[in-house]
Image: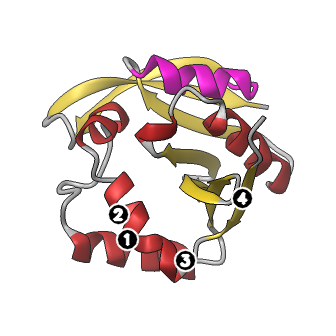
C-alpha cells in the first residue's frame, strides 16, 4: 500500500498545486471554487493567506513522497470545517480517505464539519468513511458551474 503523509506546504509545491486546482474536471466536481481557477495571482494570494494564518491548518498531501494534493481545516462561524483536494490522477486510490484521517488525528477534539456538492458521491463517501454523517443540505452558488446547486452538509462528532 502507498505511504500517504502530510507535511507543510512548501514554495516548491505551488506550481503543481496551481495546476491541480485548475483541472477542469476537478474544478467541476469541487463546484465551490474561486471564480477563475486560471487566475494565478488570485491563487498565489489565497495560498499566501492560508499559509500565514496560524488559526488555520493547510497541509500538503504526499503519496510515497510525491505531492498529490492538500488537506486543511479552519474555523467558520464557530465551527471547525475540513477540506481536501487530491490531484485527479490519484482519485480512487484511497488517498483522500487516508489524508483526511491523518488530518483528523492532528485536530483538537470536537465536532468537525464539511460540505460537498451533493452530486460529488466520491467526496461524500470519503467523508462518511471518516465518520461524518449527513445532517442536511443547502443551496449555494457554485462558481465552477455558474449556478446554484445543492450541497450536502456533514458533521463528525
| Label ID, residue 18 | 2
The residue that mark 1 highlights is 15
Residue located 34% across and 31% down the image: 29
Query: Which quadrant of the figure contains the N terminus?
Result: top right
- Specify the color scheme: secondary structure
The residue that mark 3 highlights is 51
Q: Are marks 1 and 3 in contact (CB under 8 Å)?
A: no
Residue 51, how many percent across, how many down?
55, 77
Q: Does any portion of residue 74 appear in the rendered image?
A: no
| Label ID, residue 6 | 4
Horizontal side of residue 148 vs 119, given as left or right = left
Q: Nearer the viewer, mark 4 or mark 1?
A: 1
Choose the circle earlier in sequence order: 4 or 3: 4
In the depicted view, which residue is nearer to us: 118 or 76? 118
Mark 4 vs mark 3, CA separation in Å: 15 Å
Mark 2 vs mark 3, CA separation in Å: 15 Å
Choose the circle earlier in sequence order: 2 or 4: 4
Magenta stretch: residue 81 in it? no
Residue located 63% across and 28% down the image: 127
Mark 4 vs mark 1, CA separation in Å: 18 Å
Give the magenta part as a residue range: 120-132
Residue 44, how many percent across, how many down?
34, 76
Q: SS class of the residue under badge 4?
A: strand
In the depicted view, which residue is nearer to us: 27 or 91? 91
Callout 1 crowding tier (Cα within 10 Å): few <14, some 14–19, many ≥20: few
Q: Are marks 4 and 3 in contact (CB under 8 Å)?
A: no
Choose the circle earlier in sequence order: 2 or 3: 2
Amino acid at each position: 500500500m502507498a505511504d500517504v503523509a502530510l507535511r507543510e506546504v512548501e514554495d516548491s509545491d505551488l506550481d503543481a498545486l496551481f495546476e491541480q486546482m485548475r483541472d477542469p474536471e476537478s474544478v467541476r466536481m469541487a463546484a465551490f471554487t474561486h471564480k477563475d481557477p486560471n487566475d494565478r495571482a488570485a491563487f498565489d494570494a489565497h495560498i499566501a493567506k492560508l499559509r500565514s494564518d496560524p488559526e488555520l491548518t493547510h497541509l500538503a498531501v504526499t503519496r510515497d513522497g510525491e505531492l498529490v494534493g492538500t488537506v486543511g481545516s479552519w474555523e467558520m462561524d464557530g465551527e471547525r470545517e475540513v477540506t481536501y483536494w487530491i490531484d485527479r490522477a490519484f482519485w480512487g486510490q484511497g488517498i483522500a480517505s487516508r489524508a483526511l484521517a491523518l488530518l483528523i488525528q492532528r485536530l483538537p477534539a470536537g465536532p468537525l464539519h464539511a460540505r460537498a456538492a451533493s452530486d460529488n458521491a466520491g467526496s461524500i463517501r470519503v467523508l462518511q468513511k471518516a465518520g461524518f454523517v449527513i445532517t442536511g443540505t443547502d443551496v449555494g452558488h457554485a462558481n465552477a458551474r455558474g449556478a446554484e446547486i445543492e450541497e450536502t452538509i456533514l458533521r463528525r462528532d
